Every structure is written in structure tokens, then in C-alpha cells.
Amino acid sequence: MASTTAQSGLSDAEHSAQLRKAVIASTVGTTIEWYDFFIYGTAAGLVFPKLFFPNQDPLTGVLASFTTYFIGFVGRPIGAVIFGHYGDRIGRKATLISTLLLMGIATFLVAFVPGYASIGIWGAIILTILRALQGIGVGGEWGGSVLIAMEWARTHDSRGLVASWPQFGVPSGLFLSNLAILAFSAWSGADFGTWGWRIPFVLSIVLVGIGLWIRLGILETPVFRQLLDNQRTERAPVVEVMRNQLREVILSALLRMGEQAPFYIFTAFVFAYAISTLHMSRDLVLAAVLVASCVSFITIPLSGHISDRIGRRNMYLIGAAVTGLFGFLYFGMLDTALPSAVFIAIVLSLIPHDMMYGPQAALIAEAFTPRLRYSGASIGYQLASIIAGGPAPIIATALFAAYGTGYAVAIYILACAVISLVSAALMPDYTGKDISAEYDAAV
């Protein structure tokens, strides 16, 4: 505790106050960013196939819609490289403000994209460009949010819990996005597909204003200020992290396979599967995802806290194993087409995911030396977007089209979980260790 407080140059009380501000700023900011990202995903399953691809058969329309969804994931590694560079060069705080603005403006503009009936294929093209900008913003957001919280942690044995709070922004954003869709779906009724879906995108600009106000009030982290004082910042941190810690970058991407791919199956693909295939009520699925996100309010920080006790890697291994097996139970319950069973399956689906997602931020960020941490953690984390999260709904849709059963998707979830198990076992674990001093091979 003393070393971290000394780095900050603040008293214990002042340091604690800054820690609270940093945690709140990172959590609120990621909530806003993920609200923006998730309303697109929900709309991609519910609205975009008919609005932007009306001449396709239903399955092809869904695939085309999820392809624009995938573009956002392609943008995320690009954002990680761009903002990772500046996060390691000029600081965590300034970079986070930029990512929030980029994400918020792109999301706001989605509300005004005309459909196919108005401007033909150009609507889908504009949508794709805005989705790419969303992805670039999210790509730079995660690393900074985690570091602004974790690098203010006062003790080595609390970083798992502190770093899990930015992860808390995911269920919060998921909850708010689905609540907005559900509310405006009920309000607009039959007109939801024409104008009702646009309102949640418009509201994102209000949330961005709130996020900026909060983020402007925080200080730079003690770890980064120490880098500035010691003149240890790199001119090209992305190049250096690829040269010195490429192994950690690759492992960071691969260990997310069993977490990220199932997440987007549970929260995006499920809309198309449950509504189009099982003919379940749209509101039932939305309500179930809302409840699932509420459960994550508990399970994400709890998993982060447990990782402080048993180790990040051990907690992650447990979560990957449970997720791999849960896929079969999940689709077994969905395929009953019983509203109660479908509801329970969706509500339970994020618990195994959260067992990995809670400790994941600290596990990945701690693996990188301070002067390369924003770049390394961001790139490793976001590379998973193009091999796991982005293609997951497309692969799930294609598997179901080919085999006609959800168990084919469950096998895909299991394969992703096995990759995570192996990768996590090889990942270095810095639980309880000092992460303020340089510890990569170049030092």
C-alpha cells in the first residue's frame, strides 16, 4: 500500500478518493461505450436484415446483417493499435476521452442512416462505415479503462476486484441497451422497425456528455506519471511490445476465445435463433437478456475478487471449463421451446462467461510491463475480436444452417473453451505481485 501511495504523491485519503473517481469514471465510461456497441448488435438481429437487406431470404439477411456487425470487431484491433500508442505515449486519461467521443458520435449517426427503400445499398455501406468507427473506439477504450482503475489500486491483493469494475460496464451497457430496445419497442409498436429502433441510438449522445464530464475530473495514474518522471515512455510502444512481449499478446487473444465467442452467441445470435427459429416472443428474449445482465452485476466483480484469493489463472481455468460444458445444457434448454426453459437458459448463460470475464482484465493487463501496458493489453485483448467475438454469430448461424441443430453451435463453444484452457495455462500470472516496475525482457 505504501509504495502505490508514494508513487501518487497523495495522502492515503486523497489516494482513496482518486481510486474511487477512477473506478467510477472507468465503469461509467465503459457502460456508455458498451451501450453503444450492444444496441447495434441487438438491432442487427432484430431490425437490420429487413431494413437494409430486404431482397434477401431471411437466413441470408441475418448473415448479411451480422457481417456488418462483424466489421465493428475488425475495427477493434485497429483502435487498439492507434489508441494503445497514445495511451503509452501521452497517458491513459486523454486517450480515454478521445475513444468516448469517437464511439458516441458514430453511434449517434447510426440513428439517421436511411434504409434500403430510400437509398438502396448505400444505407448498408454507411452503416458499415459507422460500425467500423464504433469498433475503433471500443478498441481503444478497454485498455485505458482497465489501466485507469487498476493502476490506482492501493494494494497488490485487490487488483482483480478493482480491474473487474470496468468489466462491469459490459452487463451495465447490455442492460441499458436491451432496456432501451424493449422500452421503445413497446412504445413504437408496429413502427419499431421504421423509427422506434432509432431512438436508443439518438440517446447515446446524452450518455456521452455524462461520460465526458466524469472522465475530465480524474487524474493520470501514478504508474504512468512515474514513467514520465523516469523518462521511460517509448517512441513506438506498439513496435516494442510486439518485439518484447509477442507471446503475451498472442496468449491474450487466444485465452479470450472461450469467453468472447460464447458471449456473442448468448447475447446476439440468440435473438435470431430464439425468435426466427424457435418462434419465441421478442420481448421474452429481451427480458431474459436483461435479467442475465443483472446477474452479471454480481458475478463479474465476485469473480474478480475470488481471483485475488485463488489466482487469476486458476479462476480463469475454472470458468473456461464450465463454459465449454454449459453450451450443451444451454441449447438443450432452448430447443424445448418452452418459454420458462428458454428464459432460464438465457439468464444462466452469462454466469460461466463472467467467471472468466471478472479476472480477465487483471490477468491480461498485469502480463505487460508498464511502459507497454496500454498497447500490449489492448492489442492482445482486441485481436480476439476478429477470431472470436466478430465471427461468432456468423459461424453459429452457418453451423445451424448446415446441421439444423443448436448442438453444432455447442460443439463450437466447447472448441473455443479448450483453446482458452490451453492459453490460460500458459499465461503468466502476476496475482499479488508488484506491477509498477518494468519487468519485460528489454529492461
Image (cartoon, rainbow, N blue to C red):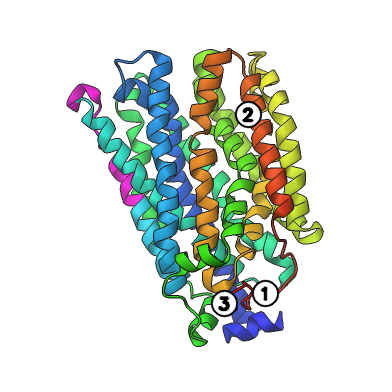
Disc 2 marks which residue?
A: 412
Position in image of residue 24 (x %, y %): 54, 62
Cα–Cα gap, marks 2 and 1: 41 Å
The numbered disc on residue 154 is 1
The numbered disc on residue 223 is 3
**SS under mark 1:** loop
User: Along the horizontal axis of the image, is 233 left or right of 146?
Assistant: left
User: Along the horizontal axis of the image, is 199 left or right of 334?
Assistant: left
Pair 3/2: label in front? 2
Vertical placement of residue 302 versus 48, above or below: below
User: Does the magenta-highlighted stretch encompass residue 78?
Assistant: no
Specify start and end residues of the magenta stretch as a single range: 104-119
- Amino acid type shown at disc 1: Arg
The numbered disc on residue 71 is none
Are the residues flagged by discs 3 and 2 in contact, CB closer than 8 Å? no
Position in image of residue 286 (x %, y %): 53, 28
In front: 172, or 433?
433
Does residue 111 appear anywhere in the picture?
A: no
- Report the predominant secondary structure element of the magenta stretch: helix
- Count neighbours of disc 1 (C-alpha within 10 A) and say few if under 14, some if 14 to 19, many if 20 or more: many
- Amino acid type shown at disc 2: Tyr
- Count neighbours of disc 3 (C-alpha within 10 A) and say few if under 14, some if 14 to 19, many if 20 or more: many
Are the residues flagged by discs 1 and 3 in contact, CB closer than 8 Å? no
Position in image of residue 199 (x %, y %): 34, 37
In front: 414, or 1?
414
**SS under mark 2:** helix
Question: Which quadrant of the figure has residue 368?
Answer: bottom right
